[in-house]
Image: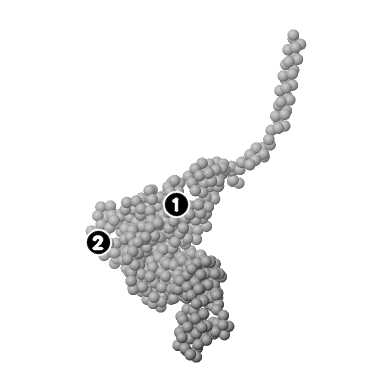
Amino acid sequence: MKKILENKLALILVTLVVGGLIGWILKPSSSESHEGHAHENESGVPILWTCSMHPQIKLGEPGDCPICGMDLIPAAQASSGSDNPMVFEMTPEAVALAQIHTTKIGGSNGSGELFLTGKIQADERENAAITAKFPGRIEKLFVTFTGEQVKAGQRLATVYSPELLTAQRELLEAVKSKSTFPQLYAAAKEKLKLWKLTDSQITEIEQSGAVREQFDILADQSGVVTQRNIAVGDYVSTGSVLFNVVNLNKLWVLLDAYESDLPLLSTGNEISFTVAGMPEENFKARISFIDPLMNANTRAASVRAEITNSGGKLKPEMFVTAKIQTAMKPSSAGVTVPRTAVLWSGKRSVVYIKVPNSETPGFEMREVTLGNRMGDKYLIESGLQAGEEIVTNGVFAIDAAAQLSGQYSMMKRPQTKSLEVSEEFRNQITAVADAYFQVKNGLVKDKLDESQKALAAIDQSLSKVNMGLVKDQAHDKWMEILNGMKDARAKMASAKDIEEARKHFSMLSFHVLEMTETFGINKDVVYKDYCPMAFGDQGAYWLSEQKDITNPYFGASMLACGEVKQTYLKGQPVMDLSGTSSAPATHKH
């Protein structure tokens, strides 16, 4: 019995040893333990996977989106990381799936440029209807589809006409008694001429003594067949339209101009336009006609320019965006947008603008003030500039995706920094901004004396601001800004050199930007610019009246250093966006 137990124990030990040895042999090496599961990037940071259509999905491994079933992509590929929280970025695949379309908007801007939209159309004077000159039956067709190019004199169809056979026989009988009854002969020939038979055809019938059973329908002009109204076997009567042919060598550019645009236009104005299919190519034409009547539905008049279609690049019904340099600046910068571009909730209206020159498609949410509705368009009183590219199809898809991902959307917006003040007060502080621009431009030119002299204009404009026009919170805010501007102005006036003046100018700029963002100024558009290299790479902001960068912190040495961080449009509220403070970071006062 004891011997049996010892044998069993030995067998168990052998089994354990063999099993452990086999397990050690089959154990995967550390280099293979995560093969096919690359959950970390080269720096050891875990990779998250997201859906291009549902960016709120964040998973630790690749697979399918649990909402739509699309393949997940690395989150790093889903966005280029725009620092503007009002911008929502999408992958090109998501843009295509959401069927997002954009359009440049028309209207006028403050520099005298007028933007209009419209279409390419065929020149109405180049249209021709080819009709049946005599009744008969269509025996053959030589042009069988629309869009075919034809030349003048080309055969289009062959017709058999019993009436024409009878008329030919009458002519042959009249020829026999030509000398006796010349009037009868003349009448028989005239009848055939009325049916558009040529003299050579009539002479051929007379000389041959035989009637022709079939006659050809010939093209009256060269062009493209836009409509074919007949088929083989059809019976046509005199005057029936058989084909429509249009010559596309000359085209019309038809643009929609609203009432506010018409005073800026006159015949002979040169226009520069692009079409959607060839955005990189510019075409030029001149206005030849302005419709004297307004369309009752759209409240727009048609403006026409004529262009020679060399190479046949342009096609009727192509969408056109045209720019016209006018002699005088418009009094209003109102623009119009299609109804499909606007999302609105109560008094709040939102559009999405395509971010220009962006590697990853990005769309900026922008609040706008709607004016009157004109047909299928809205007049935008404030919030947009002519020439900006807005989303006209797929707006809801962008807004819904932004909302689901936790970004700002129509239903979720940042707090507004702007306070309501009177138009009179806003006019008064606009004069302060104009004086500030003189100070800024002196530093741009590296002229300390010119900049310090311009400080007197700031004093004068500040003294004319009526503090009684603002109450409560607006009054307290203005007093804070006013004291800050006076302090920065005094220190800048006493600066011994331009570098010291520039340090105090940064504080002056901070208060001018606060004034602009809080109360608004009556300028069509101004820009919040930023130089990252100012004051030892700590950066500084300033307000500019022009889009091109002219750096007041470096002047001629680095004139174009900087970027536009924010655009302020007249009448548009300014949002309190975190991370965009314009306070100087280099020194304290």
Secondary element at image label 1: helix
Front-most of 566 and 433?
566
> Which residue occupies 67% across, 39% down?
32
Q: Position of residue 17 (x, y in %)?
A: 73, 24
> Which residue occupies 70% across, 29% down?
23
> Which residue occupies 46% across, 58% down?
101
Front-most of 581 and 412?
412
Q: Residues within 10 Å of mark 1 (few under 14, many from 20)?
A: many
Q: Residues within 10 Å of mark 2 (few under 14, many from 20)?
A: few
| Residue extending farthest left | 468
Disc 1 + disc 2, Cβ < 8 Å: no
User: Quarter holding the N terminus?
Assistant: top right
Using the image, tell me which numbered label, if any, was put on residue 398: 1
Secondary element at image label 2: loop
Q: Position of residue 330 (x, y in %)?
A: 35, 70
* Three-letter code for the amino acid on which mark 2 is drawn: Asn
Front-most of 363 and 424?
363
| Residue extending farthest top | 1
Q: Nearer the viewer, mark 1 or mark 2?
A: 1
Residue 8 higher or lower than 404, as above or below? above
Task: Name which quarter of the figure residue 568 lies in.
Answer: bottom left
Q: Which numbered disc flags the more N-terminal residue, 1 or 2?
A: 1
Left/right placement of residue 254 relative to residue 484 reads right
